[in-house]
Amino acid sequence: MKNTPDISASIDLLVQFYHLDPMEIVWHGNYSKFLEDARCELLNKIGYNYEEMRTSGYAWPIVDMRIKYVKPAVFQQRLLIVASLKEYENRLVIDYRIRDHDTGELLTKAQTKQVAVHIETGEMQFQSPDILINKVEEFT
């Protein structure tokens, strides 16, 4: 197994009123949207976002998502969301850290796992397609 290149991407987000629940903290369901935004930024950096995935003949559904809520995010808080590639040879594993943008305080840890599925056959691939491997290895 090769070492995974250090590839990360980040986004800034300002917590809006519509992100909140009745307890006036970010509703837990919104975190998956925040992760998606950071994941897209990472995939754009690699050059293999969802459009490129579809064009290459593969879908990449999320098969596992884990979120650890350390501390709630609140209205008007500026967040820094970092997505980091951890595995890519057999599946896409991405780790996330959501921090207070100004203090760096850790608010949330998360991880997603995605697998390649051949669009025409619907078959899950047990190895990542060459196109993803080549895109990632361009960073080494």
Image (cartoon, rainbow, N blue to C red):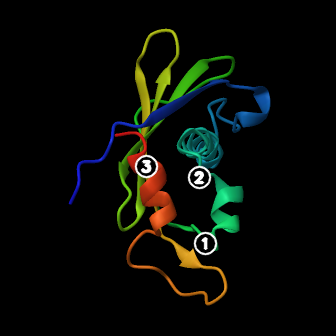
Q: Which mark is residue 71?
A: none
Q: How far across and how far down the image is residue 50, in percent?
A: 67, 57
Kindly report the distance in space between the C-alpha atoms of the residues bearing marks 1 and 3.
Answer: 16 Å
Q: How far across and how far down the image is residue 17, in percent?
A: 77, 27
Q: Secondary structure at mark 1?
A: strand
Of badges 1 and 3, the one in the foreground is 3
Q: Amino acid at mark 2?
A: Tyr
> 4 above or below 20?
below
Q: Amino acid at mark 1?
A: Tyr
Residue at image position (61%, 90%) is 121
Specify whether residue 38 is in view.
yes
Q: How far across and how far down the image is residue 68, in percent?
A: 40, 44
Kindly report the distance in space between the C-alpha atoms of the residues bearing marks 1 and 2.
Answer: 11 Å
Tag 1 residue: 58
| Dot 2 alpha-carbon crowd within 10 angstroms: few under 14, some 14 to 19, many 20 or more | some
User: In the figure, residue 106 lies in which quadrant?
Assistant: top left
Kindly report the distance in space between the C-alpha atoms of the residues bearing marks 3 and 2.
Answer: 9 Å
Tag 3 residue: 136
Tag 2 residue: 48
